[in-house]
Image (cartoon, rainbow, N blue to C red):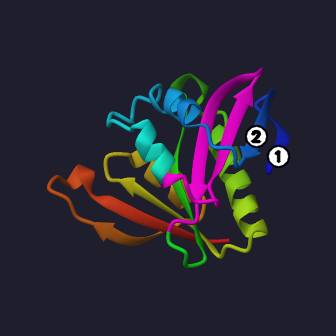
Amino acid sequence: MGGTAEIETSGEDIEIIITDKIDPDLILSIFERIPEFNQNLTRKEVIYRLSDNSAQLYLACLKGKTVGFKVGYDRFKDGSYYYWLGGVLPEYRRRGIAGLLLESMESKAKEKNFEYLVVKSRNRFPEMIQFLLANGFTIRDVEPRDKIEDYRLLFRKKI
C-alpha cells in the first residue's frame, strides 16, 4: 500500500510519500546525513525493527530529492502507533517539513484505528522535545541512563 500527498510549504512543493515498502538502504542513506544521529544504525536493525507488517515509511521529497523521513510501526500492540525514527536534513529545516511528515503519520495512524502516537526521544535533543510538545505530545515516562543527556523520554499523543 503506498500513497502520496502533495503539499506546498514556504512556496515550495513538498511531496509526502507514504509506503509500506520499507527500503532499509534508503532509510540508512538519510539517517547518515542527519548530524544528530551519531550512533550506528545497521541494516540488520532496520530490517528487524520494521519486519512487522504495520511498518510504514513517510518520505518528504522536494523536486525529486528526499529531504526528510519518518518511520513508524505497531511496536507495543496496545493501540498505539510507534514513531520510531525520523528527521529532516539540516539544510531543509525550518520549512515545516517535520510537521508535514508528522501530520501524515498521525492521519494514517488514525485511519488505521490507532488511539495514540508514541515516540521516544533523548534529553540531548531539545529541538525534538520542543517539537513534540508543540504538537500535542505529553511526556509519559522517563528512562534514566548514566548521563542525563541520554535519559529517554517517552511521549504520547491521543489522536
Residue to which mark 1 is pinned: 3
Residue 68: percent from the left, percent from the top? 61, 34
Marks 1/2 in contact by CB < 8 Å: the verdict is yes
Crowding near the residue tagged with mark 2, few <14, some 14–19, many ≥20 C-alpha atoms within 10 Å: some
**Of callouts 1 and 2, which one flags the residue occurring earlier in the amino acid sequence?**
1
> Identity of the amino acid at label 2?
Ile
Asked which secondary structure carries label 1, the reply is: strand
Crowding near the residue tagged with mark 1, few <14, some 14–19, many ≥20 C-alpha atoms within 10 Å: few
**Distance (Cα) linking label 1 and label 2:** 6 Å
Q: Nearer the viewer, residue 71 or 53?
A: 53
- Image point (58%, 55%), residue name: 72
Does residue 10 belong to the magenta stretch?
no
- Residue 117, compared with residue 96, is above or below; it is below
* Segment tinted magenta in the rendering: 49-75
Q: Give the image quarter of residue 22.
A: top right
Q: Nearer the viewer, residue 104 or 135?
A: 104
- Residue 94, compared with residue 135, is above or below; it is above
Which image quadrant: the C terminus?
bottom right
- Image point (36%, 72%), residue name: 141
Does residue 50 belong to the magenta stretch?
yes
- Residue 55, compared with residue 47, is above or below; it is below
- In the image, 38: left or right of 51? left
- In the image, 156: left or right of 15? left
Residue 138: percent from the left, percent from the top? 49, 69
Residue 128: percent from the left, percent from the top? 47, 48
Residue to which mark 2 is pinned: 17
> Identity of the amino acid at label 1?
Gly
